Image: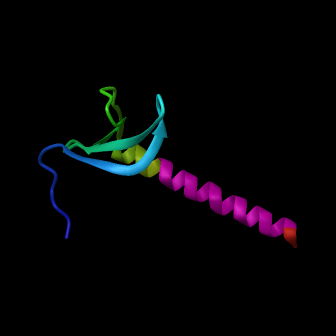
Amino acid sequence: MTAHVTKPLKRRTDARVQDQGSRRLIVTLYPDGCIGLRPERTRREETVSLSACWQMAVRQRVAYERAQKKAAKRKG
């Protein structure tokens, strides 16, 4: 069961990014349908809408499937 987001929800992930060294990624889920991403111990946050994340994920999956299909075609 999922919960409705009524206030910003922050979580520290195990994913790491290179920003003045290797830092954990902090993810914030906002009630207005945006995700905020920032390296741990920094203030600068990058935000993206959930619909843009969805579109990017679908495009990435389609590109991967096309590449796999093309590679299989070449193989014979």
User: Residue at position x 21%, y 41% from top?
Assistant: 32
**Residue closest to the eye, 54 or 16:** 16
Q: Is residue 15 left or right of residue 61?
A: left
User: Residue at position x 71%, y 64% from top?
Assistant: 68
Q: Is residue 75 left or right of residue 37?
A: right
What is the x, y in percent for residue 38? Answer: 35, 35
Placement of the N terminus among the 4 image quadrants:
bottom left
Q: Is residue 39 magenta?
A: no
What is the x, y in percent for residue 17? Answer: 47, 40
**Residue closest to the eye, 55 or 39:** 39
Placement of the C terminus among the 4 image quadrants:
bottom right
What is the x, y in percent for residue 58? Answer: 51, 55
Taking 2 as reference, is 15 above or below it? above
Q: Is residue 21 left or right of residue 28?
A: right
User: Residue at position x 59%, y 58% from top?
Assistant: 62
Q: Residue 70's image quarter?
A: bottom right
**Residue closest to the eye, 13 or 76:** 13
Q: Is residue 48 left or right of residue 61?
A: left
Specify the farthest residue to the bottom: 76
> How many dots with numbers?
0
Q: Main secondary structure of the magenta part?
A: helix
Specify the farthest residue to the left: 6
Q: Is residue 71 magenta?
A: yes
Q: How is the image coloured?
A: rainbow
Q: Which residues are magenta?
A: 56-74
**Residue closest to the eye, 27 or 34:** 27
User: Residue at position x 26%, y 49% from top?
Assistant: 11
